[in-house]
Image (cartoon, rainbow, N blue to C red):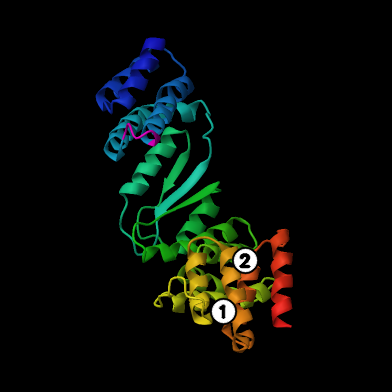
Amino acid sequence: MEETIKSVYDGVLNGDQARVEAAVRMAIDAGVAPAKVLKDGLIEAMAEVGGRFERQEYFVPEMLVAARAMQAGLALLKPLLVEGDIKASGKIVLGTVKGDLHDIGKSLVQMMLEGAGFEVVDLGTDVPPAKFAEVARATNADIVGLSALLTTTMQSMAPATVASQTRIGGNPTAVALGLAKALLAQGKAREAEPVLDGIKDGPELAAAEKLRPLARYLIASGSVEDVAGADTPAAHFFRAARVLKEGSVIAALEEMLAVLRKDKRYRDGEARLVSLGLLELLDDADPQKREYLNKLASVLF
């Protein structure tokens, strides 16, 4: 029995589909429990494939052939697993977002997930946000996976995320606000702007109103190059956008404080609104939020 399981394992590692199919059939004929073949043969092998990929011993081609070999064995086991009421590790709805027709990466992820014991519902490509939400709700999915290759279609991920989470049972405006904050904290204003525009009521509206000027500022500053090392208000103003896009809310706040301290004219304009938006990105429990609130207050009032 152990030799048969090892043959399944080795077949997956080597991407030998015929060997995997033969070994799985042999295990079934020998009365080996389907769950054991799945866990010790297929899943363990795919875990090793993933490890070799992380160690740069395997690359995408090796992962693809291994995953296809695994799927061939899984196809033979599925009917027996269903009969035996073997539970999947979880259910995942997977698809490529609207406007994008690329599916190689998505298909590879699907095969790896199935190899790890998950049930995957594949929606294909060019999937509208509402479809993710509809299928996630209908299938009682645990996870929704969104795939995109193009930077232009990545913008479809935001509304799809909000739609999926709210249909599964989340608070629509709370989910949207959390997503918008996460996007803005990475400088992804174009993706965040439509999410913020969708917040029209509820307790999160006030926070969204503070974040909208920040989103507009980030979009506008994308075409402006700051002068490296310059100590002018304008340089600090546009440098704040750059450091935020690099992932530092605190550094962006420091740049804005420099603007407000150097030129009083900025204190009643866009810099003030952007600073308040940056402050909104910090968690209420973060002690730095209180610290920078006090710093802003000392400059503005």
Residue 112, given in percent of the width and then of the height, sits at 40, 37
Q: Is residue 55 magenta?
A: yes
Q: Residues within 10 Å of mark 1 (few under 14, many from 20)?
A: many
Q: Amino acid at mark 2?
A: Leu
- Whether residue 69 is situated above or below residue 239 in the rendered picture: above
Residue labelled with disc 2: 281
User: Residue 90, which numbered label?
Assistant: none
On the question of residue 46 being in view, the answer is yes
222 horizontally vs 143: left or right:
left
SS state under label 2:
helix
The residue at 44%/28% (across/down) is 43
View extreme (bottom): residue:
265
What residue is drawn where x is 39% and y is 42%? 110
Query: Quadrant location of the C terminus?
Result: bottom right
Task: Give the image location of residue 19, x and y in percent.
Answer: 27, 21
Q: CA distance from mark 1 to mark 2?
A: 13 Å
Question: What secondary structure is the magenta-colored segment mainly?
Answer: loop
The residue located at (40%, 59%) in the rendering is 97
Q: Quadrant of residue 102?
A: bottom left
The picture quadrant where one finds residue 273 is bottom right
Vertical order, 19 against 59 (above or below)? above
- Horizontally, residue 255 falls left or right of residue 206, namely left
Which segment is the magenta one? 54-58
State the residue in front, 153 or 281.
Answer: 281
Locate residue 105, reporting x and y percent: 34, 48
Quadrant holding the N terminus: top left
Of the two numbered discs 1 and 2 on the same chain, state the one appearing first in sequence.
Answer: 1
The answer to whether residue 1 shows anywhere in this view is no
Q: Secondary structure at mark 1?
A: helix
Mark 2: few/some/many CA within 10 Å (<14, 14-19, 20+): many
